[in-house]
Image (tube, helix red, strand yellow):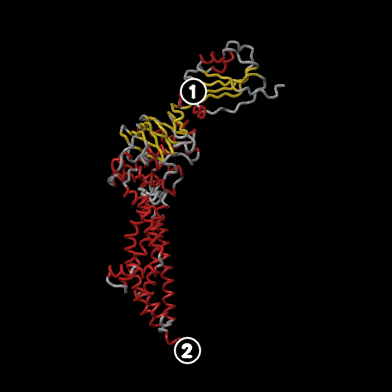
Amino acid sequence: MPNKDFNTPWSDVPSLLWPAYVETWTMVGIVMAFVVAIGTPLGVLLHNTSSFGLFPRGPVFSALNAVINVGRSLPFLILMAAIIPFTRLLVGTTIGIAAAIVPMTVAGVPFFARLVQNALREVRGDVQDMAQVSGGSTLQVIRSVQLSEALPALAGALTVNTIAMIEYSAIAGSIGAGGIGNLAITYGYNRFDDHIMVATVVTLIVTIAAVQLLGDRCAKELTR
Amino acid sequence: MIEIEGLTKRFGDHTVLDDVSLTVAPGEILAVVGPSGAGKSTLSRCVSALEQPTRGQVRVDGQDFSRLDGAALRSARRRVGVIFQSAPLLRRRTAAQNVALPLEYLHATPESARERVSTLLERVGLAERADYLPAQLSGGQQQRVGIARALALAPSNLLADEATSGLDPATTTSILHLLDELRTEMGLSIILITHEMDVVREIADSVARLDAGRIAEYGSVSDLLLDPTSSLGHQLLPDRPAVPATTAGETWQVSYASREVAGDWLTAITSAPGAAGTRIEVLSASIEAIRGVAVGRAVLAFEGAAPRGLAEHLRERGLHARPVAATVEKDAA
């Protein structure tokens, strides 16, 4: 059985898997911090410049909307390749974790902004009116009504976005960013290592199921 | 005190409100009625300063509301408490936290806010529901929370936009009584936007009917009730179903046109000059007090022709009488 020779012994799998897993979460964690920090205000702006918002501005909305659509229309692999010069400019390298974080953030921010916009649009319009006639300023209404009322939906958006970023990190891993994806490609695919392949697939399935479960739990808790 | 003067609102080419003028004095309740699409909600949004008028003014306690923005607009908005249809409450906040919202926006200290909120919840009868979430309250209780919130900043004016639509009749009555009491206690000027005539009959002092953006009729409820030509008066006190007449002849409708009608008016009709010997059938009759004013109506059938001079005779007694379409053309044979 010549195939067997390619496989890492099961006993060695965890020691390979664990550092890769930590790398994946490092990437996803840093990217999500940027995504939430940039995507939330962007989504708030997108919603409030739309006709449903607190300060409708047609042209601003159209421009933002177009930028976000462009960001969302490229498949991640293409986006990653397309912005290599930008990545190099920003972090000085095009391989490794730092280099993966740039395209992941560029892909994640418009995605999250759209999810935030959708979540805010679900907030009842008359609640917004009520807050305004109660003397709330724009910022007060955004905070105490829009974001607060949409919190369960925002928890859902965060879950979806995190899962997408785990997926993107695996794609980024395929071009040398490290993490689970890198492990799966270099060992599992290039070296026909079935054990590593099975281990990474199972790890990803379990991770994503856990993230979803946690997200659902949070959303339910926040609904009260 | 709310004074609306020459209020016109256009959306593009579409004129939604056309030269609307209304005044609500302190302690007065003005009802605005009209079919859907007549401009009631736009009027409401102009009064709560959610929309700016195209032309005209909305003055609240003497200050023109319609040209403000920013902080001035926010502080102006605080002078009109607004009660919305189906009480929009924040789902994730308790009743008390919902009532506290306008106080939070004003950066009131937590202690003063807590005190104010408990006073208000007590006043609307929800003291023991303070820590309930909106989903745990009935529709009527939610609306009470909405009223408490509208009163949080002690406004001198209240705007109730379809506040009782969707509530059952008993709850509607209790909410209206609460508004009535509050108006007396606090001297509030209240504008009630509604499509329910029962609401008008129950608590309004004056009423305006909007039709296609214009004021079609406007006056005090009692004046309109006693005006036989008023269509609002007629809607406030619709005709009762009448029994068919058994004899051929003229049918007349008699209604109150004055506050001084003697209690024996119905029997007095038989003493009208020339009425002696004429058979008079009462086909329907009603007397009721609306907002403290007695209003009566009757439909009478005269065998043959009504006595000449009947209308004049009744006018002297504060009644309006007019022949109605002969209802007895039917099988007279």
Asked whether the viewer can see residue B295, the reply is yes
**Left-right relation of B60 to B268:** left
Residue A16 position in % (x across, y down): 36, 79
Asked whether the viewer can see residue A26, the reply is no
Nearest the viewer among A15 and B141 is A15
For residue A158, which quarter of the picture?
bottom left
Give the distance between the C-alpha atoms of the residues marked 2 and 1, in whole angstroms.
106 Å
**Left-right relation of B107 to B148:** left
For residue B157, which quarter of the picture?
top left
Q: Mark 1 lies on which chain?
A: B
Residue that badge 2 annotates: A1
- Residue at left 39%, top 45%? B128
Residue A164 position in % (x across, y down): 40, 66
| Residue neighbourhood size for the residue with mark 2, other residues' Cα within 10 Å, grouped as few (<14), some (14–19), many (≥20) | few
The amino acid beneath tag 1 is Asp
Quadrant location of the N terminus of chain B? top left
Residue that badge 1 annotates: B227
Report if the CB atoms under discs 2 and 1 are less than 8 Å apart: no
Is B34 above or below relative to B325?
below
Residue A112 position in % (x across, y down): 38, 60
